[in-house]
Amino acid sequence: MGRGRLKLDEKQINKLVEMVKRGVKAEDIEKELGISHYTLYAYLRRLGIYRKGKRYLKPPNIKVIDSEAKKGYIAGIFDGEGTIHVDLKRGKAQITIYNSSEELMKWLMDNVGGSTYRIREEEYKKLGYKPSYHWQLHRITNVYLFLKQIYPYVIVKKQKVKEIIELLEKTYPKLRYL
């Protein structure tokens, strides 16, 4: 039996892309659009969001930052305490923010997503330092969307952020649709 035609119209495809941008789970997208898991991933592959092999992209799972003030605040934190790591050979990217405030790390998780870790508490206590935390954001799609959201507000790392956005768009051209 041959492959059938995909069954979403332009309006539904736009809704799919918007749901992926918001970080809606695959199961919820399937239920909302009335499509199977295979149809969803066929569209994600067609849109360049999901690929097999070296250039595999998982759908993003971060939140859209909902206010300009929050974008500016997060950009300031990133400017002062953040790092970016991109490994195109492995198809991985990561943003990390280090800080001694557990409350700030929880706030980042609530407003952006990602994960928070406590670092070497015993070693820090022996040296007389406060415990340190780091917030991390993984996946190329997450890093790309995060950087696109905060780019207008970044000052110190603006050129680096611009270069990474351009590099990711060049390597994964369909990221622009996110």
Image: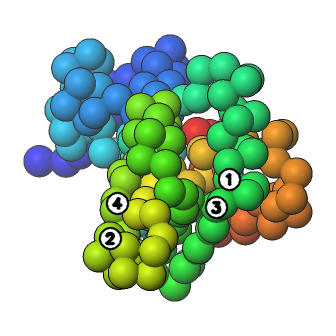
Q: What residue type is labelled 3?
A: Gly
Query: Which quarter of the rendered picture does the C terminus lie within?
Result: top right
Q: Mark 3 points at which residue?
A: 82
Q: Distance between the residues labelled 3 and 2?
A: 20 Å
Q: Distance between the residues labelled 3 and 1?
A: 4 Å
Colouring used for the render: rainbow
Q: Which residue lies furthest to the bottom in this view?
A: 89
> Around disc 2, counting alpha carbons within 10 Å, would you say few (fewer than 14), some (14 to 19), or many (20 or more)?
few
Where, by quadrant of the figure, is residue 79 drawn? bottom right
Q: Distance between the residues labelled 3 and 4?
A: 15 Å
Q: Are marks 2 and 4 in contact (CB under 8 Å)?
A: no
Helix, strand or loop status at disc 3: strand
Tell which tag, 3 or 2, sits nearer the viewer.
2
137 or 16, which is in the foreground?
137
Q: Do the residues labelled 3 and 1 touch (CB within 8 Å)?
A: yes
Q: Name the residue under label 4.
A: 117
Identify which residue is drawn at 19% across, 39% down.
37
Identify which residue is drawn at 68% across, 53% down.
78
- Which of the marked residues, 3 or 4, is nearer the chain's N terminus? 3
Tell which tag, 1 or 2, sits nearer the viewer.
2
Q: Horizontal and vertical percent for residue 153?
A: 82, 40
- Which of the marked residues, 1 or 2, is nearer the chain's N terminus? 1
111 shown above or below 175: above
Q: Horizontal and vertical percent for residue 15?
A: 46, 19
